[in-house]
Image (tube, rainbow, N blue to C red):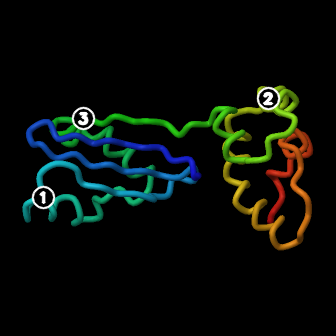
Amino acid sequence: MEQLTTYRVMGKQTAISFIFKYDLNGELKVFEIVGEPLNEAQKGWLFGAYRFPIDEEKIILWTKMPEFIAKFKVEKIPADLSFDRLWEAYNYKMGKKDALKVFNKLKEAEIIKVFLSLKGYEAHLKRTGQAKAYLATYINKEYYNNEY
């Protein structure tokens, strides 16, 4: 399952909320409108004038604009970058103690790279028929830096 950072943008004067979910590269993956439907003026505001936050950088800019802050409250729910989440995503339940030990030495940027590399690694294994490495080996040998 892909790790997503969620932003819940709630209107202060309306019952409208927007849900934006971005992957670890900051690309928009999910957009949802919650609450009452948008009227034409609201649609024009959100989707016009290059305002729609198609990437995470744009929504971060939103949160710094006084006119936006006056009308909306933003709640950020970070992606789960925990060892337990990685253990589930890696899905090869061998050597957990060793994997946890090496995981705890990683910097956040490296943890993000590990999560981002999993899909390519799985495709590589399927293509080549190669056996899956223990998670500790995957991290120790920095397989997450390979280009699959």
Please tell me which residue lies in front, 24 or 34: 34
In the image, which disc is placed on residue 112?
A: none
Q: Nearer the viewer, mark 3 or mark 2?
A: 2
Identity of the residue drawn at 89% across and 50% down: 133
What amino acid type should be assigned to the residue bearing mark 2? Answer: Leu
Q: Do the residues labelled 3 and 2 touch (CB within 8 Å)?
A: no
Identity of the residue drawn at 51% across and 47% down: 4
Identity of the residue drawn at 82% across and 32% down: 96
Mark 2: give few (<14), some (14-19) or many (20+) Cα within 10 Å. some
What amino acid type should be assigned to the residue bearing mark 3? Answer: Lys
Of callouts 3 and 2, which one flags the residue occurring earlier in the amino acid sequence? 3
Question: Where does label 2 land, which residue?
Answer: 100
Q: How far from the left and from the top, in percent, is residue 55?
A: 44, 56
Q: Nearer the viewer, mark 2 or mark 1?
A: 2
Q: In which quarter of the image is the C terminus?
A: bottom right
What amino acid type should be assigned to the residue bearing mark 1? Answer: Leu
Q: How far from the left and from the top, in percent, is residue 119?
A: 70, 60
Question: Where does label 3 land, which residue?
Answer: 73
Residue 79 drawn above or below residue 50: above
Please tell me which residue lies in front, 28 or 85: 85
Q: How far apart are marks 3 and 2 (CA)?
A: 37 Å
Q: Is mark 3 on a helix, strand or loop?
A: strand
Q: Is mark 2 on a helix, strand or loop?
A: helix
Q: Is mark 1 on a helix, strand or loop?
A: loop
Question: Where does label 1 land, which residue?
Answer: 38
Residue at the far front in the pictured view: 93
